[in-house]
Amino acid sequence: MLVLPDFLTRSSLATLLAASALAAAVVAAPAMALEAAASTPAEAAPLAKPRVKAAFEGFFVNIDLGYSGSGGEAGPLIPDMQAGAGSLPASWGSFSAWKSKGCLFGTSNCYNRAITTDRGGGMAAALQLGYNIKGYVDLALDLAWSGSFGSTADTAGIGTVSTLIGIHPLRFWRADLPVDVRLYSGIGAFEVLYYYETEFQTEAKGKAWTGTSLPFGLQTEYKIDRDGAFAIGVDLRLVRGSYNKWIYNNDKDIASRLDDAPVTTLRFAPRLTFGFHF
């Protein structure tokens, strides 16, 4: 009779101890699994490839030197001149009157020589300041000039400031090429064609055309050192000028504006390019 309680007590204690051990094992299992996982070397995650900077990405400065042809119209129609009205003196409305004012020939040849957009060819130069966006496309400010030198009566020049946008097709294939090809176009909001003549005046006087222009072309560059700053190349440029104002006398502000279709020119200006990329 005295053994039964002791047996029951011992059995209950054994059951309680077994249940406690089982509960402790269940609770400790996740922690042990986490500890084991932490102690096991994890497989190294693949590293992301660093972005390769394109060879021609970033800020750039181009200095161009070459030659520009000249193209345009000899003696384009000037409405004010032909009608003898507007801002020019009415007496200049006939060739006979022009002869008395200094025109040496008094014929249509005189008019063609004195009023022309077919001037401004010769040495060509340009300066470009721009930024290339990840090698794909660029924006640039372009200051271009071309002209000839000689006697005062033969001196002529063209100057313009343009905004250009270019696309670089090779960048879509490879980023690290040391050679680059650029197709570009833009607009020159103000272009001046300035020249001297002696047909209207016995002494050489400056005349000018003003208007807009559309430069477009292809440029290629090569870097001897891919990671270096210097590049050399060739710029093959065409420019279409469009003039709507002829300035007879810049000193006295005598000019004739074309109200109809502007006078156009088309010139080819190939140049060597010396580029610096940062």
Image (spheres, rainbow, N blue to C red):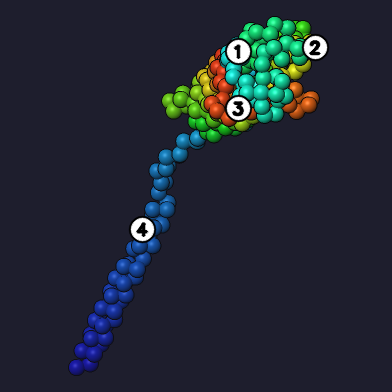
Q: Quadrant of residue 14?
A: bottom left
**Could you tell which of marks 4 and 1 lies nearer the N-terminus?**
4
**Could you tell which of marks 3 and 4 lies nearer the N-terminus?**
4
**Disc 1 to disc 3, C-alpha distance:** 15 Å
Residues at badges 3 and 4 in contact (C-beta under 8 Å)?
Answer: no
Front-most of 191 and 184? 191
Front-most of 275 and 67? 67
10 Å crowding of disc 3: few (<14), some (14-19), many (20+): some
**Disc 2 to disc 4, C-alpha distance:** 102 Å
Residue 226 percent across, percent down from the top left: 57, 21
The residue tagged 3 is 258
The residue tagged 4 is 33
Residue 205 percent across, percent down from the top left: 77, 16
The three-letter amino acid code for the residue at tag 4 is Ala
Q: Which residue corresponds to the image point at 79% horizontal and 25% vertical from the top-left? A: 251
Residues at badges 4 and 1 in contact (C-beta under 8 Å)?
Answer: no
Residues at badges 1 and 3 in contact (C-beta under 8 Å)?
Answer: no
Label 1, secondary structure: give it. Answer: loop
**Disc 2 to disc 1, C-alpha distance:** 21 Å
**Disc 2 to disc 3, C-alpha distance:** 26 Å
The residue tagged 1 is 74
Q: Is residue 36 above or below residue 161?
A: below
Judge depth for marks 4 and 1 and give the one in front: 1
